[in-house]
Amino acid sequence: MPPLIYLPAYNCAKTIVSTIREIPASISTKAHILVLDNASTDDTAQLATTFLKESLWAGKATVLKANRNLGYAGSQKLALRMARSNPATPFLVMLHADGQYPPKFLPDFFTKLEAGADLAYGCRSKQTFGDLEETPLKVKIAIAVLNNLECRLTACPKIKEWHSGYVGYSTAFLKKLNLSAITETRHIDGNMLFAATKLGARIEEVPIFKRYNDLEGFKGPAAYGYILHCLGLMIKMPSTIPFLCEPDPQLLPSPDDFEYILKP
């Protein structure tokens, strides 16, 4: 299987088709799409399937539906295990199905990973993209504070964005990780980045912008919960190193976790 563009999706019926449509045609000849519907209560999986069958991705896409809500981290772990269990898949890039991360940056991630990066992460840049970068001020301040703390506590000052969900991993890097020891919280992206720094992985930055439109970021209890998860991981990070940086005994995803809606 060629490089994977993995779209985690939960109740994304309004955005799934438009997000896939925005993926640059230039990479359709060398990539495969994996949509993982996380037990949505709407018709996300069906809409994705119908569109993919009739698009330039016909025959180059897979749609799975989880049999239960695996959570943000659980969905990722399933996709990561699928990617690294296929010897023909060199890397995976995660593109959220809600449309907040512009698909036009996918070729930039491909370039970094094809050139040997173990991990490529998106870094929001107001300086580069101006008003296109729409992260709300309160969210921006919270992320800046958390970024600063994480850089200090992990002694990784070069990491500019610990909280981006726009990220790509080489399968060679994924095979070095014990995914079972990676957090089950929504800060899995930061935890993966932390593991990469401790493994001496080659990490590359991709400038991006994030658009919110009428979509909402975390607020209220969800926002405070996310911040607590981040702080908790920072405290636990040193003690988790031995568990993160060893091969995962569970190499294959369980077929009980999902069903195929569309096979290539």
Image (spheres, helix red, strand yellow):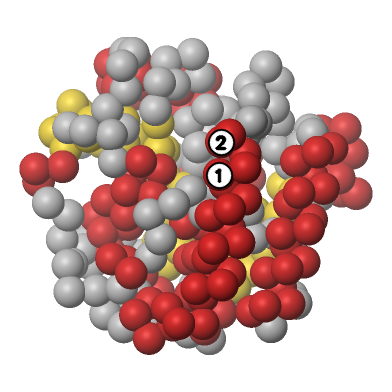
Front one among 7 and 224: 224
**Residue 121: which quarter of the image?**
bottom right
**Residue 90: which quarter of the image?**
bottom left
Instruction: Look at 50% across and 41% down and name the residue there.
Output: 95
The correct choice, above or below, for 22 with respect to 148 in the image is above
From the top left corner, tell me how far across and down residue 126 is, in percent: 86, 45
Instruction: Look at 38% across and 77% down and name the residue there.
Output: 244
Front one among 90 and 144: 144
The Cα atoms of the two marked residues, 2 and 1, are separated by 5 Å
| Residue pointed to by mark 2 | 222
| Residue pointed to by mark 1 | 225
Asked if labels 1 and 2 touch by Cβ distance under 8 angstroms, the answer is yes
Q: Is residue 60 visible?
A: no
From the top left corner, tell me how far across and down residue 143 is, in percent: 73, 52
Front one among 163 and 53: 163
Instruction: Look at 31% across and 83% down and name the residue there.
Output: 246
| Residue 56 marker | none
Q: Secondary structure at mark 1?
A: helix
**Residue 9: which quarter of the image?**
top left
The correct choice, above or below, for 211 with respect to 28 in the image is above
From the top left corner, tell me how far across and down residue 129 is, in percent: 85, 42
What type is the residue that disc 2 sits on?
Answer: Ala
Front one among 62 and 149: 149
10 Å neighbourhood of mark 2: few (<14), some, or many (≥20)?
few
What type is the residue that disc 1 sits on?
Answer: Gly
Q: Give the quarter of the figure containing the C terminus.
A: top left
